[in-house]
Image: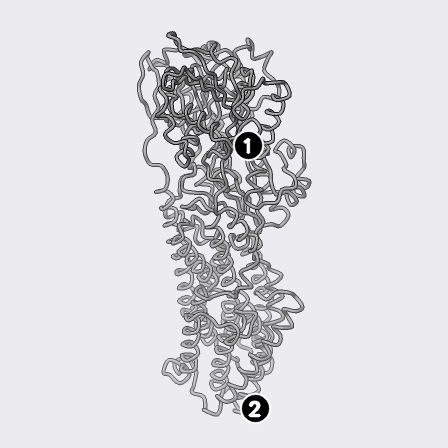
Amino acid sequence: MEQTNREISERLIDSSYCLAEDLLTELGSSNAGLSDADVKEKRDQFGDNQIAHEKPPAWYVQLLSSFKSPFILILLALDIFSYFTDDLTGVLVISTMVTVSVLITFTQEFRSIRTVEKLKEMVRTTTTVTRNGSKEEIDMQELVPGDIVHLSAGDLVPADVRLLLSKDLFVSESALTGEALPVEKEESQWANHRSMKTTRPRTANALELGNICYMGTNIISGSATAVVISTGASTYFGSMAKTLTGKRPITSFEKGVNSVTFVLIRFMLIMVPIIFFINGFTKGDWWDALLFGLSVAVGLTPEMLPVIVTTNLAKGAGVMSRNKVVVKRLNAIQNFGAMNILCTDKTGTLTQDKIILEKYMNVHGDEDLKVLEYAYLNSFHQTGLKNLLDVAVLEHVELTEVLGAEKKFTKIDEIPFDFNRRRMSVVLEKSGNGHVLICKGAIEEIINVCTHVLDQGETLELTPQLAHKAKQMVHELNNEGQRVIAVAIKTVSPKAESYGKQDESELTLVGYVGFIDPPKETSKTAIQALKRNGVDIKVLTGDNAAVTRKVCKDVGLHVDRIVLGSEIDHLNEKELADLAEQTTVFAKLNPMQKSRIVRALQSKGHTVGFMGDGINDAASLRDADVGISVDTAVDIAKESADIILLEKSLMVLESGVIEGRLTFGNIIKYIKMTASSNFGNVFSVMGSSVFLPFLPMLPIHLLIQNLFYDISQLSIPWDRMDEEFLRKPRKWDAKSVGRFMLFIGPISSIFDYATFFLMYFIFAANTPATQSLFQSGWFIEGLLSQTLIVHMIRTEKIPFIQSRASLPVLLLTSIIIIVGIYIPFSAFGASVGLQPLPLSYFPWLAGILLGYCFLTQTIKKWYIRKFQEWL
């Protein structure tokens, strides 16, 4: 029984504003809980208390999805065509490439998903309920609307519930709203409202209801009894989770691969028929022309691209796993490198997600240890579970001379905290010198019961001017992102009877204590590092503007203006996109507003990363090009993320960005090498097919040459990139690949024609009887020039001198050159129609290759000056 988000919000607000007894009646429940018969009926009606959950696909589904790459599909089509034309060598070569690529992709992603599954919480979560008039503990999944649940410190709220009774209840809603500090909750928030239909405000926010606790939040302190309003997909948490299952948006990486693929496919569809018809008409053998055209098609297809891509990504995943990063989706690594905007939540990402005491000051704002001492005595002597502010006071005192002050006092009594007074007091005695009541709490509540202030040891009357000054000072501290409480005292004569709320009167205000969720020490450094690498940071938080502004200032983010969630609701997509580009910080955002901002930035052509860990971040994690979460995140956030950090630190991201750019550089390096080289070969084949009385190379020669060239590129994932390349975000650009192919490809054709001239005129290989010599000469020159292009294209600099390839690349290309020269002299070469070349050929070959390298380097410099890019 599912409901829309709007219906769920309306239901929560209605439940909040009606009387508890009316709600119990509506739910068919009572303070004695549900009966077994009621539970069975409701289980049948509402089902299990589970949210939408995206299960990992079965292994065979994952395996089949590994075939979805456009290049894999092209290769499979060519493979099938080769089979039906009895080209068994082609079948073997192409099948090998497809198998290796698919297995690498499947193995890496299967292993990553298994790792993520292990990170999830595996233990059963239980909750205490009243059923049939007695308490029992049940599995959280068995809850139904109308159940009476009992909550205490440390409990996860198991469903959306309305409070019936509560005591000192503080709830952390950070996973749902992003708010760092716990929220006070009490059952009597709407006690004065007798009818929800007439008193409910139109502007009520479903996530700001003081007597409702939401599924997915957790109890920090206190206890409560509540009635379950909604379970499973009908909870606020569940309604958000429902939107996160199903097909994911296409990412920057996938768009880039697709665009490059279509450029190469269009090129192939144009060139292969032309070559087929030229050879068919000039040679008269249409079957040989067909086989030759097929070989050219295989040569034009960067068949090693799936292997190169997956090997690069798998290598990157391995490097990142050693840096405590789990990569769920391999494509996310390259998206890391392309990312030029990182949107991040504030709590726990920029901040420590921990409350600490920042300031303790007297009424004039000066640091005063006496204020800290009174606050410490109050926190130390109060009974029950300490809230986060008390813990912060106690931890801070351990570093000061105030520690041990409690030994001088004896506790006499305590006036507990409640939500109406919003303060609590302890009464202490010191060496028989009377009693001192120490009270701390909300500023307004403390000032209302104060008649005096303590000023440099003197007790002065609290005038309206002093009260205004105190409130102004606190307001300024709030704007600095601090939560402030006041401390007041009262010295009284000992009495036998217990102290009560009536004794909290005519107090003396002694000062204030300020708390913050401080920024992480690494945040500022990490932000500077990301900015140096061309990544802009934008903060998208559910927290309030004042706190967010202070944190952003502390971590080095310049904030001209903070845009609130309420301000973007009336903007259309274009207006929001323009605003999002110009704005660094958004505050008081709900989950859908965060997601809208991510999509708006993407619409402007940005590659957007998002880092978050709460249910309120899950939609944005899913929509971003790269979603980043942490292992302590809620399950829905981990499911929506592409990358999971085992350390919640921005510092890890810089290495991820660099690894992503390295991965992209090596992938685009291969594409441009292959595309330009193959384009040059097509020109060479077309020209030679017109004037030669035989094929310039047999189909088997083309396939062997192509296989050896591809093997030489297997080491590219282990190559290094120039430092300058890694300093900027990198994106796929099909136009850039096409332009590179058109300008750089024909260079190799010039030297192919020089080889044709050499073999035809100098070595007289110009008849069908001598075609083997001609084909052997071009086989070696073509293979060596293609292998050398690896070193020419891999860097903007002068190869071997200013930039040297990694050792694996040097070794493998050297081996391929040696083996390529040897093949025509071998029995294998003879079996495929090649023959040994005279030694006089090799000085000519050296001259042709040197000329090729020199001209390529010259054109490279011109190309970089004209187009301001290389790779």
Other residues around mark 2 within 10 Å, as few (<14) / some (14–19) / many (≥20): few
Residue 219 visible (yes or no): no
Q: Secondary structure at mark 1?
A: loop
Query: In the rendering, at what x and y percent does residue 754 appear?
Result: 58, 84
Q: In this figure, which residue is indicated by the disc labeled 1? A: 366
Report the amino acid beneath label 2: Phe
Residue 800 visible (yes or no): yes
Front position in the image: 120 or 495: 495
Q: Residue at x 46, y 75 (%)?
A: 705
Q: Secondary structure at mark 2?
A: helix
Front position in the image: 765 or 114: 114
Q: How is the image coloured?
A: one colour
Query: In the rendering, at what x and y percent does residue 190 appear?
Result: 53, 14
The correct choice, above or below, for 463 with respect to 580 in the image is above
Q: In this figure, which residue is indicated by the disc labeled 2? A: 761
The correct choice, above or below, for 58 with respect to 760 in the image is above
Quadrant including the C terminus = bottom right
Give the quarter of the image for residue 575.
Answer: top right
Front position in the image: 811 or 55: 811
